Image: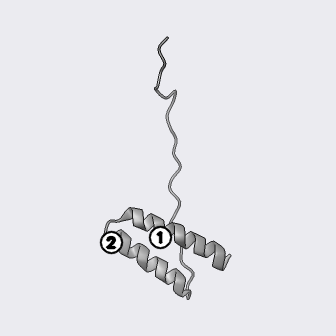
Amino acid sequence: METSTALSGPVHLPLPEAPPEPVSGCRDCLHYAVRRANAVSAGDYSKATDVNVSLRAHLRETHG
């Protein structure tokens, strides 16, 4: 008997989340936003994603 490795139907992927927004007046948020902008301008989207993860954690821990 032969095993099939094909998918049975289309794969539906969700749209990526919008990048987190820094809180106005927070120096740490500004730091993350600048790091993200620098990474994007350099074409380093992996680093930009890492900064987004850090910014989300900061927003959760500091700004609730």
Secondary structure, mark 2, is helix
Using the rendered view, name the quadrant where residue 63 is placed. Answer: bottom right
Using the rendered view, name the quadrant where residue 61 is placed. Answer: bottom right
Where is residue 25 shown, x and y percent of the image?
55, 88
Question: What kind of residue is marked 1?
Answer: Val
Task: Using residue 40 as the reference point, say whether residue 1 is left or right of it.
Answer: right
Where is residue 54 shown, x and y percent of the image?
53, 71
Where is residue 29 shown, x and y percent of the image?
53, 81
Q: Which mark is residue 9?
A: none
Q: Which residue is mark 1?
A: 51
Which residue does the image show at 52% across and 87% down from the upper left?
A: 27
Which residue does the image show at 57% across and 70% down from the upper left?
A: 56
Q: Which residue is mark 2?
A: 41
Within-10-Å neighbours for mark 1: few <14, some 14–19, many 20+: many
Secondary structure, mark 1, is helix
Q: Quadrant of the C terminus?
A: bottom right
Q: Is residue 34 above or below residue 43?
A: below
